[in-house]
Image (cartoon, rainbow, N blue to C red):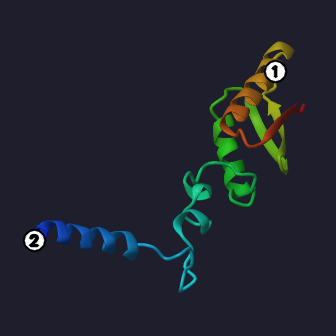
Amino acid sequence: MLKSARVPGFLIIALVLCIMLLGGCTNSGSTRNGVKTYGHDGYMGLSNSNPNLPLGNSNYYSYSSDVKFMKEKLSELPGIEKSSFTIHDPDIDVRIRPQAHLDEYETNRLREQSWRLLQENMPRYRIHVYLQR
């Protein structure tokens, strides 16, 4: 006579749960409502993970705030009487007028310091510093 094989109840429950988990969590590669996933929507993907990262979109930064920041940085250097900026993205022409008491060596050193300071703080631009007399 054949004996019936008895399957433990927890094994049946575990098998049913596995089938539900594996089969119920797929969408067969389609979306029903047109919602894009996290990495592909352009808002929360890699392009937005660091808002200060320059990505070649020069409209992200405002030129007026950049000029204001550059003027603040140049004010840290002694010897500059006046400065002006012309932006031709990605180039910035900076014209500085050194104070009258500076000699040629100090003026050239001021020009070099200005360039180094701005290039360090504004890496998305190519800085060109000119002296005005």
Who is closer to the viewer here, 68 or 1?
1
Tell me the quadrant of the picture where the C terminus can be found: top right
Who is closer to the viewer here, 27 or 85?
27
Q: Amino acid at mark 2?
A: Lys
Who is closer to the viewer here, 63 or 53?
53
Residue in the image at 39% along x and 74% along y: 23
* Name of the residue lying farthest toward the top: 105
Tell me the quadrant of the picture where the N terminus can be found: bottom left
Q: Which residue is mark 2?
A: 3
**Front of the two marks 1 and 2:** 2
| Residue 12 horizontal side relative to residue 104, left or right | left
Q: Secondary structure at mark 1?
A: helix
- Callouts 1 and 2 close, C-beta under 8 Å: no
Q: Which residue is mark 1?
A: 107
Residue in the image at 37% along x and 69% along y: 22
Query: Residue 79 location, x and y as percent?
Result: 72, 26
Tell me the crowding category of disc 2: few under 14, some 14 to 19, or many 20 or more residues within 10 angstroms, Cα based.
Answer: few
Q: What numbered label is drawn on residue 22? A: none
Q: Secondary structure at mark 2?
A: loop
